[in-house]
Image (tube, grey):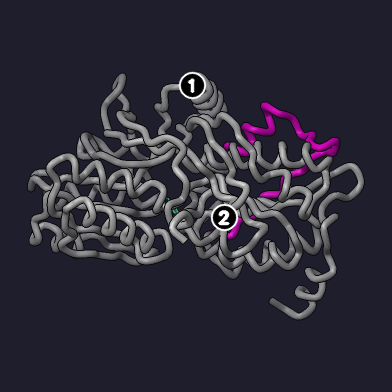
Amino acid sequence: MSILAAAALGGITGAAGAQGDTVKIGVILPMTGPSASTGKQIDAAIKLWIAQNGNKAGGKRVEVIVKDDAGVADTTRRLAQELVVNDKVVALAGFGLTPLALATAPIATQSKTPMVVMAAATSSITEASPFITRTSFTLPQVTLGLADWAAKNKIKKVVSLVTDYGPGNDAEKYFAERFTLDGGSVLEKLRTPLRGADFAPVLQKVRDLSPDALFVFLPSGQGATFMKQFAERGLDKAGIKLIATGDVTDDDQLNDMGDVALGIVTSHHYSASHDSPANKKFVAAFEAANKFRPNFMAVAGYDGMRLIYTGLNGSKGQGGEALMNAMKGQIFESPRGPVLIDAQTREIVQDIYTRKVERVNGQLYNVEFDVQKAVKDPAKNRK
Ligand code: PHB
């Protein structure tokens, strides 16, 4: 951070962003680059929230400013500084990948600007600043239930494959710990790089190791390429079961994956086919506005806007600590199911579903068949 920018940040205190009759929300998303689908989904969800709920909260007019960081952390940090110093935003939101959220955390702390993480899912993110809260999920939160499911379903030997950064580390670690406790064994832990992953070499290794199942975490946007290579290598026919976090069978790409995706068991907090009146309403409105299906990123963007609007109502349009405090402890019915923002950890508590890819009315969906209620981030509970 430049000295000038740091000085400017230091000068901004609790009343940040609450200027006159307008409050600004600064949203930073990867609208281009490899994570563009995350930006597209969250941007569409924010627009839907505003179309349905208007542009007033806490007695102020709300203005949303969306910026594209292309998934590059230096850009995220610069945009966050500009939004805080020049635009005097009342809150920052978005954050498509873990490094982008972590790069912004010191700015949130120094300027006391609440930061709502709508995508990134490494457990430690909310510990990087007392001004961070989250409407997405954490990898430990969605991984333990899948390890239990695998152990109960005749899977004894697993190879894990994750993207080599924060959320992948979390998924690999929490899966292995729980699956081993359950009596299973992890034969090998494989990793692929975040950028430019080629899955062919690791898939060959998996074939040679011949486990009962392959456990996979990849960030949203990589699932379709992975599934194509999985099928090309014939792993679907080699009797190796695929189990994954729901990031791999992402609703944004799932329907185009074809029959190779059928039967994949995943664990996650949101499926577009979640059977509740609130979700049916959300999906219908989202699809009518966008001509594509909402995924878990969209639902976190939508809920993040609810969190900020309700927070602004509670703080009477003030930013800083007043807004942060008003966001803590919120309970509401999300399209994903009931959720709570834990006031202590600022982390989302939510139901986690076990699902299987099935064809429903000609379309591929993650069909939920089991649920763990009100799951907290396990990484925080054991400290
Ligand atoms: C992350 O970078 O934290 C991340 C991104 C996409 C996902 C999950 C985690 O689907």
Look at 36% across and 52% down and name the residue there: 222
340 or 3: nearer the viewer = 340
- Which numbered dot is residue 280? 1
Q: Amino acid at mark 1?
A: Lys
Q: Amino acid at mark 2?
A: Phe
Q: In the picture provided, is 268 more to the left or to the right than 152?
A: right
As helix, strand or loop, the secondary structure at mark 1 comes to helix
Residue 107's x, y, as percent? Answer: 69, 66
Q: Does residue 80 lie above or below 235 as drawn?
A: below
Q: In the picture provided, is 282 more to the left or to the right than 78?
A: left
Boundaries of the magenta span = 44-70
Q: Does residue 292 lie above or below 383 as drawn?
A: above
Quarter where residue 60 is shown: top right
Residue 20's x, y, as percent? Answer: 92, 46
Residue 203's x, y, as percent? Answer: 18, 58
Residue identified by numbered label 2:
95
